[in-house]
Each structure stands twice: as structure tokens, then as C-alpha cells.
Amino acid sequence: MFGDLFEEDFSFISNNHCGKGKKSKPRDSEPPAPRDFTNLSGIKNQGGTCYLNSLLQTLLFTPEFREALFSLGPEELGTLDDSSKPDAKVRIIPLQLQRLFAQLLLLDQQAASTTDLTESFGWNSHEEMRQHDVQELNRILFSALETSLVGTSGHDLINRLYHGIVVNQIVCKECKNVSERQEDFLDLTVAVKGIAGLEEALWNMYVEEEYFENENLYRCGACDKLVEASKSAKLRKLPPFLTISLLRFNFDFEKCERYKETSCYTFPIQINLRPFCEQTEMDDSEYMYELFSVIIHKGGCYGGHYHVYIRDVDELGNWQLQEEDRLIEDKLLRETENAEEIENPLAVLKGIFSEEESKQIPVDQLGQRLLEKKGVSWNKKYRKQYGALRKYLQNHPQIFHFSPDENKVGLKEKQKLLFMSDSQRQDLQSRPQKNDVQWKAEKKPTRLRDSSAGHHWFDLNDSKVQPIKEKDIEKQFQGKESAYMLFYRKSQLKRPPEARGNPRYQIPEHLLNEMNAANTELQKKRVECDSANNGIDLHLHLSSCYKFHNGALHPSLTWKESVVDLTIDRRKTLGDLRQSVFQMLESWEGDMILSIAKPLPAGLHLYQILDGDELTLDGVGLADGTDVFVWNGKEVGGTKVMTGPDHEPVVVNVLRLAEYNEGGKGQHFTESQHVFSCSTKLGDLHRALAPSGGIILKNSAGPDKEAKNWEVFREEDMKETVKSVGLTDGCSVLILDSHDQSFVNVSSGNLTAFTYDISWLQVKNFCRTEDEEKPVKITATIETVMSDIKRKAIRELQLEEELANDSCLRPVSRNGKLLSPVPEDYTVKEAELKMGSLLGLCHGKAPTSTQLFLYFIVGSDQNASPEMEIVVEETASVKECLNLMLEKSGLSGDNWHLRRIDWCYEAGEALSQENATLKELNVCRGDTLVITEGKLPPKGFLKIPIWWFKSSSHRKHGENAEDKVNGLTYKMEALQVSSAGDSPEYIHTDMDLCYAGSIEIAGEASLEDLKMQYVLIWHLLLCHVQWF
Ligand SMILES: [Zn+2]
């Protein structure tokens, strides 16, 4: 079974490591974490090496192993320092293992690295690092060690500690000849499937006999014939350390796949191996073993994780569980244990049988016993899941034994052994028993050792080490996470008292020195790191590099040049800081005051003075990155500096209504930043920003500048301060001049218009004509009334207020012409004024809304008669209007009538109804009328203007006529004219077009009559007759 143990191929474990040397690893800036309270070191997981870590910890906590290893000195193993020398004989694996053990015992770090060790195995790649099976590794490791210790005093180290012998015997029934075969082992592999625990497995292997009988007979060498014989195996030699591997991984031949056996498999803390050994006269204590390590596999058969429970035999670790916690945990555990036991009918039944004096119980009484002893009814508790009781017993023939008539049932012999009491066992074994070890695996293991010395358990899980209770081991009896390898040590092995709690015990001098040095280095690094972690950077601002202006301190140079960084331990005192600053500044005269400074939007501002040199920097709240101002505590550059939160400078964003388009497209504000101390009275701020009569509004809602967000500061607010009214850095205030205040509803304190509707009109003074005056901009919305604009304009133009009574606003056309005055009660919208357009402030009253402003000329020759203006009631009759105009133009007599001006600026349709009102005749504001000489044409006559189209061949003949229409041809666009009865065509403005005069003709005249008239004119023109 174990015959091939030493025949493994270890060729991949290279023993030649010369030339590799020590790898120089980059130093981590952070030193490794120290050990935690257990004071035991874990081992880093290098990537799938948890199995290796579990095994290494087991070996470390086998003091006899590690001491044997440590006993091999440099004279036998060489030294790692020589490993690069070509001729040196250096045994790398034991040396690396020694060093790793020394680190695990002494180096103050949370977890050690196995890189050097695995390199000594020749494992360099991740591939080689990949999870091996821990049982496999155990053998590989032992073999590698043996190989590398050949020729040293340690050559039999593994054998001494782990080697055992099994003997297989066949006894001939006839001649009693015994045939033997010995097998060596370093570990025992025991079956799990269908077996309740370790003792049962050992019983099957080393107590049960196999018989050769009937057809299957044994050929005895002595008798030289086929005989009946018995075959058995026994443990002949027990090693000091017994390693047991559980066969949890099996192969399911039906499903053709590996699987992990997760069934319950118990194992005792202490075990007496005598029943499994050859009979000797040795003392029973020679057979007692104690569990000291359990390697646990968590996961399935294709992967998972290993960790190990280890008993700290030498009491190296600090094992402490709070007594209270322990009591509570114990109680909980007991309860769950009971519950678990009750859940498992096999355990319950076994328990009943073990307590029975008689060997067998009638099957029909078993149910009653169950109820009596355990308080459960089979039918209620288990029947649904496990079936009838009898059936259940029959289904477990390896445990239960029926009487021949099948009426009684009992435990099978080997099961009984596991449960029997001491006296029973003594009877059975007919051998004096000197100890009182119990075998009841189902029951709690008896605590033989009330003194807890050397019997504390830890869970070593890679880097993590945690104390556990012995009882926790029972959690690993079954399940996905369960015990996989067991390590027992002979109970007789005693530890010397000087080894207790002494991790330095038996470690060779050179390793002690190396670890001491490494710990010193670690300590130093931790101090450095600690100091670095406690170091804070302070930004020192020197007053000599600063000037105070605009409410705050500003560096004379750049920020960078004015700041000196100082790194200091936060645990130092203010006095230390002051000393450091003194040392940095070569000369400093007078008091040195250190003030906390803070860069604000307005500049650097000073806060409290750092006072109390005995206080620590941490204590006064100096954090990393704090700004500290170094000064004399009074002034900077001759200016007194106010400090503290009450004098914080605040940058206020000041908005004013921009002049038209000043702020770019859609920007109605100009913005500027002003700095005020937060203690500034609002009244002072008002005086500084707003003109007399102006008002200040605060944007109370948000960044958008809509009217609803603006709030007026009222008179009573003026005693408040910038801080108390909530003006902080970046707040906006809007300054409105007095004339802008029509947008403010003072009662509600809000703007009445959305500020984006606010625009401007330009007003220019036309009352004085001597010098060119600049227009002023007057804010307005489309709802602003013209009289308001006029009043504001008069104020802005600094004209006399009385002018308002005798002036009006008149739009100025693009070519500078004053257009019809706008009625004063019109809004900008009603007046159809475009924002930004220019208005002229002119003498004369503006027409009321019932008045008409009219232009008029005398005759149709503009040059002869300048255009004149008149304001007349719209209810005036034509006659009255004519008389007013005649009066204004200094004409008299009644040989005049009024005509409208037509589209070519000629006298057009006559206003023939002299008594009709202007309103009735739809005469509109801004119309031009022509005073025409002569009586009105008879009623019913029309005056029709005649144009003629001149072909290019006639161009030179029509030059005079063409001059006549100079400047008016643009009005001809898209005009249709039917010439000489031809089909209509478009007249283009670049064609020659002549005004030929007008024809007066009766309204009733036929088209034929009109044509006759045209023809007449046509001939006149052809004959070069000047028609005019
Ligand atoms: Zn024989």
C-alpha cells in the first residue's frame, strides 16, 4: 500500500540552485504589518499555495521536527550567502526551510513569504505553483528534504519522526505457519466512504481478519497445499508522528467522475492505537496519540482552499477568548450539537445501543426506548425522511446486527468497541488497561487536561491566524469544509519546560542574529513610516512677501514664490514648529506670530493666532496642508490687517444693466467683482456701488438672473452687514440707477420685469441743434410708456425738467429723418419701436392719441416747397385741416384743395369730401398731404398717373424724363403694367421707365377713352415735345 512512497519522481525538484542567488526585491514603501494579538505569523498566499502553507505550519508546530532541522548547522548545510559560489556545497532546501521557520517564529510580521523556499524547490512559474494535493505535497516535501540531507546528520530526520511499519500476516489454519510481509509508511491513508470515523476505519484495516475458505483457499508454503487461512494486517511500528490522510476524494465509476465525500467522519482528540497494533508487552502509554493538526479542505474535488487547525504545543501564541464570549459560544454550540445529533437518526440510535446493558433490543421496543431516552418519536421525527424504523435498521447492515429471527437488533461488534465503556473494553481485550481513555467518538471527547497549557488551538489560514476552541474541530467532521489530513503526536513526547513560550528555543545563533537584525530594520522602517504617516505639510506664508490691498493679503510675487513648505510631525508641539520656522528663516526680528491663514477668493485671510507652545500640532488642529502666516501680528507692509471670521473679505459680483449690446449678444449686464469685508454695513456698500437714489438687489435664488430671483435691499437693511444679509463669495448684486427703478415693485421688493426683457432706447437731444450731442441710453421694456422714457431722457441729458411739458420723442429714421412723434401714452410696443432704435427729443408737444401728426407740402415739387408738419385733431374736417395748413404755410385764398400723396410722392387722390373728418377718410399719423392749387376736380374725375416704358433704342431721347424719376424707380418692383394692350409683363427696376404725367379722366370713362388719352401723350413724346 505504501510501497511506492519513496519511489516518486522528484526530478523536478531541483537541488541545484547555484547561480540564482538572492533576489533583490524592490523595497515596499510600507513595511509589512506586524503580528496581531495572537503573536503568531501567518504565511502569505503566493497564489494557490494555501496547501503548502497549511503543511509548513504543521511542520513548524511539530517542535521535534523544527528542532531537528535547526540542529543542522552551516558546517553541514553550508550557508545561503555561499549559494552563488560555484564550488560551495549548499543545501538550499533545508536552509530555506530553516530561515522560513525562524521568520515564522521570530520575525515581527503578520505573514511570511515562501517565495525563497518555493524557488529552492525549483518552482518558479505559476504553473508549478498551482495547487498540488496536500497529501502529495507532504510526500514530495519529505522526499525532497531527505534527498537534500543525504550525507548529513539529518539524513534520517524524516524516518525518525514519521516512519512506521505495517505488517501483513497470513496464518495457516493447519500448520499455524505465519507468512509476513512488512510495509513502510510515512502516512496512513484511510477510507471515508461508508465509514463513521477514524476508529472504524482502523478497525477495518487492522483488526478485521479476512478468511481464505471454501473455494478461495490459501496455498501454504509450509504445508505446500491449499489450506484455510486468515489474513490480517497490524501496525508493527508506530512513528512519533502519525499522519493520516482521509480518502475524501473518490471516483464514481457509474458517473465516471471524481467526487468529494462529505459524510460525517469523526476522529478523536486522543486515540489509543493499541487495538490496531501487534501485541507487545509495552506500556499502554506507548500507544497513546494526541491530535495536534487538522488540515482542512474547503470546496469541491476540482478546487478549493486549505487551512489548518493547529495545537500550539509550546504555547508560542497568545490565545485568548473573552470568558463571557466563550460561555455564550459554548452554550450555543451545545444547543446546536444536541439539535444536530437529534437530526441524525444513526447517531441517536447508536447512542441508545451504547447505553444498553443487554446486547440486543427487541425491534418493537426500540421505538419506545427512543422516546424515553431522547424524547423523540421515530414516526413523528424521522419516518417521513428515513422510512420505517425496521427498514432503516436493515438498510445499515454494517452497523446493526439482527438476531436470526430478526426480532432483536444490536450493534455490530466493531461498532460496539467504539462505544463501550472502559470495563467492557477490558473484558474484551483480556489485557490490563492502565488508562481511562474513552472511545466514544459520538460523545464529547473527555477533557483529560484541565490545565490549558500547550493545548490551545489556532486556525492558520494563510496570512490570518485566529484562536479557536478545541471544540471547533468537530465542525470539520463533515461537509464541504471538512478535515482532510490528521496529524497525531505520541502522547509520551514531552516538551522541555524551557521551550514553553520561547520561540527562540533551539534556533541556531546565526538565525537568531539574522532575525534580530531584520526586526531592528523592520522596527526602524515602521518608525519612519509612522513618522511619515504623522508628517503634515504646512504652507508657510511670510509676511515680507505679501501686501495687503483690496481687502485681503496678496503675494507680491507669485503664490509659489511666497510659500515655503514645511513637513513636520503632527505630534510635535507648537514650540517645535516655531523653532523650525526660526531655523528656516535666517533672520527674524521682533515677535513672530503664527496665524492660521486661508486662501479665499478675495486673497489670503488670517484667522486665529497659534498660541500655546506646549500644545501639539495635532492638538491645536493643524491638519495636513494648513496655511500658516508668519508675521508680527499687527501689520503687513504698513497696513493694519484685520483678522478673524468677522473680517473675512467677500467677493461680490456686481451687475449693472449694460448699455445696448455692450455685453455682447443677449448680455444685458456688465459684471465686475468688488471685495468687501463681511462686516461692512450695507449702507456703506450702497454708497460705494450705487449712485444716489439707486438701489441694490440681491440675487437670492440662484445663478440665473431672472427677475423673480432679485430682491431689493430696503432702507432698513442698510444697517445690516454683508454677512448678516447672506452675501457670500460669488453672490451677485444688481445695481439699478434711479431711473431704472420702474422695474421694481417696491412694495413686494421684486423686479417687475424679467431682466432679459429689459432693453434700451437711445434718445438724442434735437432741441438744441448747435452741436452734435451724443445719445443717451434709456432702459425700457416693451411695456414702458413713452412719457417715462422722455422723463428719464431729460434727466439723463441733464435738461431742465420743464422741457417735459413742451417736448416729444420722435423716431429717427435710418437716414436721419425725424419721423412722426410718438404719443406719450403709447408703450414702446404700441409705438412699434425697435429696441435700441434712436429717438429724437424734440420741441413741441407730442400728439395725443386722438390727434394726428401730418406732414404736408405745397404743390408737388418738394424742392420748391419744404415739407412742413402739423398736429391736428383726427376729428377735424378736411376743410379745417386745409385752413390750418394754409395758415402755417402762409398762404391764403380758397383756390386750394388737399390731395394725398401717392406712392410716387406725387399729389394723388384728392380729398374731395371737404366736410368729412380726417378719421373718416382714413388719414393716418405720419401721412403726407399735398396742398394743391386749384379747385377740386369735378366730382367723379380721377387723376391717373401715366408711366411709359422706354426701349433701349430710345434711351437718349428720354434722358430728361428719366431724371424725373430719379430715386423713385425702386418703387417699381413687381409692378405690372399693360402697355398698348399687350399681355402684362414684369417691369424690372434696371429698365428704363419714364413718368409721363397724369391724366384726369372721369370715373365713368371707358378704358377706350383712357387709351386714347395715352396715345395722345405717346405722340407728344415721340415728337420731342416737352410735356411738362
Ligand atoms: Zn500450513
Image (spheres, rainbow, N blue to C red):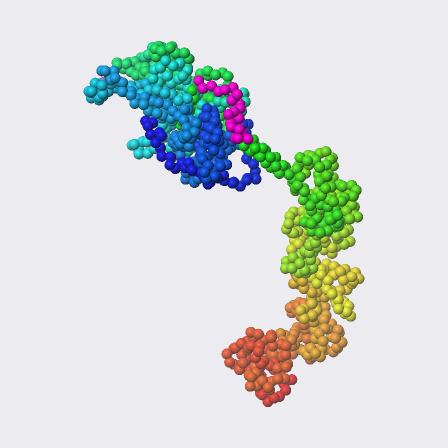
941 part of magenta stretch? no
Which residue is nearer to you in this view: 763 or 558? Answer: 558
Bounds of the magenta segment: 492-513
Q: How many marks?
A: 0
616 over 346 or under it: above or below: below
Residue at 39% over, 17% down:
287
Q: Quadrant of the C terminus?
A: bottom right
Q: Quadrant of the N terminus?
A: top left
For residue 62, side relative to residue 1028 (left or right) = left
156 over 592 or under it: above or below: above
- The percent position of residue 251, horizontal first and vertical second, equals 32, 31
Residue at 64% over, 81% down:
964
| Residue 423 figure quarter | top left
511 part of magenta stretch? yes
Q: Quadrant location of ligand 1? A: top left
Q: What main secondary structure does the magenta stretch of the protein show?
A: loop
Residue 725 visible here: no
Residue at 28% over, 14% down:
403
325 over 531 or under it: above or below: above
Which residue is nearer to you in this view: 978 or 643? Answer: 643
- The percent position of residue 513, horizontal first and vertical second, equals 55, 31
Which residue is nearer to you in this view: 889 or 566? Answer: 566
Residue at 39% over, 11% down:
433
| Residue 488 figure quarter | top left
- The percent position of residue 60, horizontal first and vertical second, equals 47, 27
For residue 316, side relative to residue 768 (left or right) = left
Residue 961 visible here: yes
Which residue is nearer to you in this view: 858 or 502? Answer: 502
Residue reaching furthest bottom? 1023
- The percent position of residue 852, horizontal first and vertical second, equals 69, 67
